[in-house]
Image (cartoon, rainbow, N blue to C red):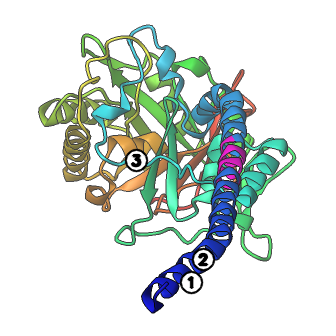
Amino acid sequence: MGIDERNDSFKIKRQNRREPKAASLVTVLVCIIALAALTGCALLILENRHLKMAEDITAEHMAADVREMEVDDPGLHTDMQDPYMDTHMPDEDTFIEDTYVAPDTILTTDLLGEIKERIIRGEDISAIWRALFADDIVVGADGRFYFFPLDDKLERHDYVSENFILDDERVLTYQDENGNVLSQKGIDVSRYQLEIDWEKVAADGVEFAIIRLGYRGSSEGALVLDPYYEANIEGALANGMDVGVYFFTQALNEAEAIEEAEFVLEHIAGYTLTYPVALDVEAIETANPRTANMTREEWTDATIAFCEHIKAAGYTPMIYGNLRTFFLMLDMSRLESYEKWFAFYRTPIYFPYQHSIWQYTSTGRVDGIEGDVDLNVGMKKFE
């Protein structure tokens, strides 16, 4: 065998000695990869299980929470039950575009634990999302959630949540650090309170009343005067109370909004109002309302037309609504100059922007009124 042949033989033998070692390394690497894959699958299964648990918990509470949303975002007045009105909650898609944000589906174990603990404590889904997304206003409507980043261009209120004090009779006041009451106690009423003993109402500490003047029907669009309007405004004024009025709108456009304003001005002539003339803007809950297809821009245009017409006549206009009203139906950036009256039936208040009156319950009790009445805390004394 020559030198070249011996070298080739040596190379072959050395290669044969390496092959078992290489095969072993390959086997080990394959096992490691397989183990990593199995571990990844296990983690995915666990994560999916966590997500499924969260979804199950959410689903279990969602039906009740959708109903709870309407406590957050009440159908503000019992106008919803008015036999003259054919009302229904319009589809929110007609009010807003490209604002809905789904919650992040990648939830950590800690976050899932926090959500679970909050549900165990009895918090509903709306409250949980609001706690987790503190930089947004979270609006629940029709089983969905909408997230609105806080707008630094809109004026914020400076109310201190801890200074709103609810007493044993469920009456809310706003107080300073020394316990001095800075707010006014108010009610708003309509035909649903029937006959009111205004002398007893005044004696029960009610300082202002906002009277429903009327409404526009939601199907035919007729303008209707509340049958108790005159008795209520005259009774409140006769007993020394500050008085304002409100009108429930179903105007389709600016022309109809001005028509509503003219109707209001006609019926407040001769009365001294110290509180604003409010436009009640809200979604309604019976089939086929005439406003069902209105856009956010159209609602805002009509609202401005009403307010400007009232303002030109020398009265203070005000917009009345809830979270759905101010974030889904109206463009707040165009309404900065008008007084706001906000309806929210929980504490603390969940509305960061400037407002003058907070309607905090629809089940209040006042001497002189049989049954429930809306109670309001006023943070501004109108002159």
- Name the residue nearer the viewer: 144 or 337: 144
Residue furthest toward the front? 1
Examine the image and state in which quarter residue 119 appears. top right
The residue to which callout 2 is attached is 13
Q: How far from the left and from the top, in percent, is residue 315?
A: 30, 51
Tell me which numbered mark, 2 or 3, is placed earlier along the sequence: 2
Q: SS at mark 3?
A: helix
Q: CA distance from mark 3 to mark 1?
A: 88 Å
Tell me which numbered mark, 3 or 1, is placed earlier along the sequence: 1
- In the picture, measured across the screen, residue 273 lies left or right of residue 180, that is left
- In the picture, measured across the screen, residue 102 lies left or right of residue 106, that is left
Which label was assigned to residue 243? none
Q: Is the Cβ of the residue at disc 2 closer than 8 Å to that at disc 1? A: yes
Q: Determine whether 75 is above or below 220 in the image.
A: below
The image quadrant where one finds the C terminus is bottom left
The residue to which callout 3 is attached is 326
Q: SS at mark 1?
A: helix
Residue visible at 32% across and 12% down in the picture = 288
Q: How far from the left and from the top, in percent, is residue 290?
A: 26, 18
- Name the residue nearer the viewer: 298 or 22: 22
> Please, what is the three-letter code of the amino acid marked with disc 3?
Phe
The residue to which callout 1 is attached is 10
Q: Which residues are magenta?
A: 39-48
Q: Is the Cβ of the residue at disc 3 closer than 8 Å to that at disc 1? A: no
Q: Determine whether 168 is above or below 26 in the image.
A: above
Residue furthest toward the left? 255
Dot 2, how many residues are within 10 Å of its Cα: few (below 14), some (14-19), or many (20+)? few
